[in-house]
Every structure is written in structure tokens, then in C-alpha cells.
Amino acid sequence: MHVIVVWDYDKDLDQNGRQNANFTMRACLEGFSWVRPFSIPFFIVEVNSVERRTRLRKALINACQTLGNVNVLISPLLPDGQYGGWLPKSMWEKINKRTGQVEK
């Protein structure tokens, strides 16, 4: 099982502020297996229970409330599944590891 996590910054936040916010938000992902397939803050995060998703969600929301200039979206708990698209093979391997997809 996994979730999708994506965040964005207020348009007025400068580069230093974005780096600080990104550091704070990524700290919430510690202890989780995740992959970031794009340069934007978009993550596929492996979670193995509703409780782990809840813990992650609370940490991310608390970080946003503390920072005050970041918004976050967390998907519902997603079952194992196959994503599609055009990415390097090495990225597909990382995504598949976290989404439970076995290569055929």
C-alpha cells in the first residue's frame, strides 16, 4: 500500500524559504520508504497500514501549520497497483518497489 504526497509553496515565498520549507516537509518522510519521480515535491510513499498513513498525514499537516506558507495534499491509502507513463527504467524500479507492483 502507498500514498501520494505533494506540496506547494505560497507564491511569495523566496528561494531560501522554499528550501527551509522543503527541508521541514521532507523530515516528515523520515522512516518511510519513498520515491520522488519528478523535480517538484511529488512523492510516492510506501505505507503498510492505516495507522502509518495517519501518522504521516498528521506530521505533514502539523508542519504546514507551523510553516504557514506550504499546502499539502495526501491521497487516500492506495492498494498495490501499476502506474503508467514515460520514465527512466531505474525510476520505474523505485516506484514499483513502493507500490507493490511486480515486473512481468
Image: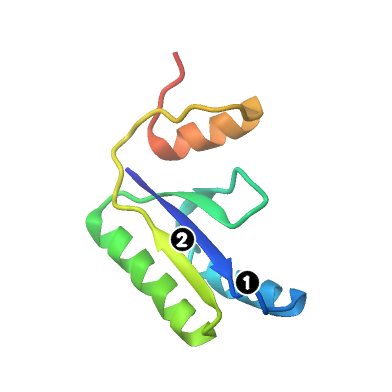
Query: Can you say which quadrant of the picture contains the N terminus?
Result: top left
Q: Is residue 27 above or below residue 86?
A: below
Q: Taking 57 as reference, is 85 above or below it?
A: above
Label 1, label 2: how many angstroms apart (C-alpha)?
A: 15 Å
Which structural element holds mark 1? helix
Residue 52 image-quadrant placement: bottom left
Instruction: Please rate how many residues cluster around mark 2, counting C-alpha atoms within 10 Å: few if below 14, some from 14 to 19, many from 20.
Output: few
Tell me where residue 90 appears, x and y as whole percent: 64, 30
Q: Which residue is mark 2?
A: 31
Which of label 1 and label 2 is nearer to you? 1
Q: Which residue is denoted by mark 1 in the rendering?
A: 23
The image quadrant of residue 98 is top left
Q: Earlier in the sequence, mark 1 or mark 2?
A: 1
Viewer-closest of 53 and 13:
13
Q: Residue furthest front?
A: 11
Q: Tag 2, which secondary structure? A: loop
Q: At which x and y percent is residue 103? A: 46, 19
